[in-house]
Amino acid sequence: MNLERGSILALAALVWSLALQCLAATTPLQTDLEYSVKANYLVRFAAFVEWPSQSFADSRSPMVICVVGRDPFNDALERAAHAQTAYGRPLAVRRPGTVDAAAGCHILYVGRGGGALVPSGQRPILLVTDGAVSSDRGMIHFVVSADRVRFHIDLQAASRSRLSISSRLLNLALSVRGG
């Protein structure tokens, strides 16, 4: 009887240990997948937002996607942006050191430790924040809902920055503030 009880406890401990190992092994994969999806969203946002014409040096200037703070994308953002265009402009990826150094960026993802958010209306930059990083919200704020990457949109903040967001993108948002 004690041997059976000990065997059951040992088996339960083994199953628990394996479950924890599997969970630990899948967490980075889930994070990689999550940020791969977010990278693709960042690239797609470029085609659904209009910037003032003076946001670009000339008609051949690239649409620049920037990441400040801790970069969770690895090379997923470069892969997603490779050979893509928005409004006939090639996409480029930069990683300026700080939000203040983000001049010339059109889409700005603020990761952990990225610093203070760009005040709305200062520059025509689509500010993208992440619920996995902070509760501070930009014009677009990523969240994970029902195991899917989704986002909220602050239309008023985008408007103050002279950005126009397509109704097609607004329809995909979990919520639209000021819509």
Image (cartoon, grey):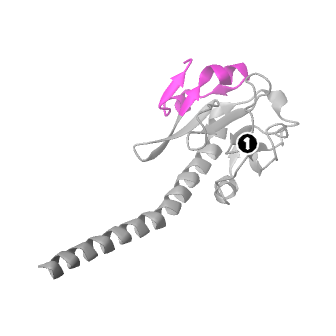
Viewer-side residue, 55 vs 16: 16
Q: Residue at x 27, y 71 (%)?
A: 12
Residue 32 placement (x, y as % from top left): 56, 59
Viewer-side residue, 3 vs 177: 3
Viewer-side residue, 176 vs 11: 11
Residue 73 in the figure: left or right of residue 23: right
Q: Residue at x 21, y 79 (%)?
A: 7
| Region of the chain picked out in magenta, as a range | 152-179
Viewer-side residue, 86 vs 177: 177
Residue 112 placement (x, y as % from top left): 67, 45
Q: Residue furthest right?
A: 57
Q: Is residue 156 above or below residue 99?
A: above
Queried whether the magenta region covers residue 5, the answer comes back as no
Q: Quadrant of the C terminus?
A: top right
Q: Amino acid at mark 1?
A: Gly
Residue 113 placement (x, y as % from top left): 71, 44
Q: Residue at x 84, y 38 (%)?
A: 104
The kind of secondary structure element at disc 1 is loop
**Where is residue 138, by image quadrant?**
top right
Q: Is residue 49 above or below residue 79?
A: above
Q: Residue furthest left?
A: 1
Q: Residue furthest front?
A: 2
Q: Quadrant of the N terminus?
A: bottom left
Q: Residue furthest bottom?
A: 3
Q: Residue at x 75, y 37 (%)?
A: 106
Residue 54 placement (x, y as % from top left): 84, 28
Q: Is residue 87 visible?
A: no
The residue at which mark 1 appears reads as 114
**Where is residue 59, by image quadrant?**
top right
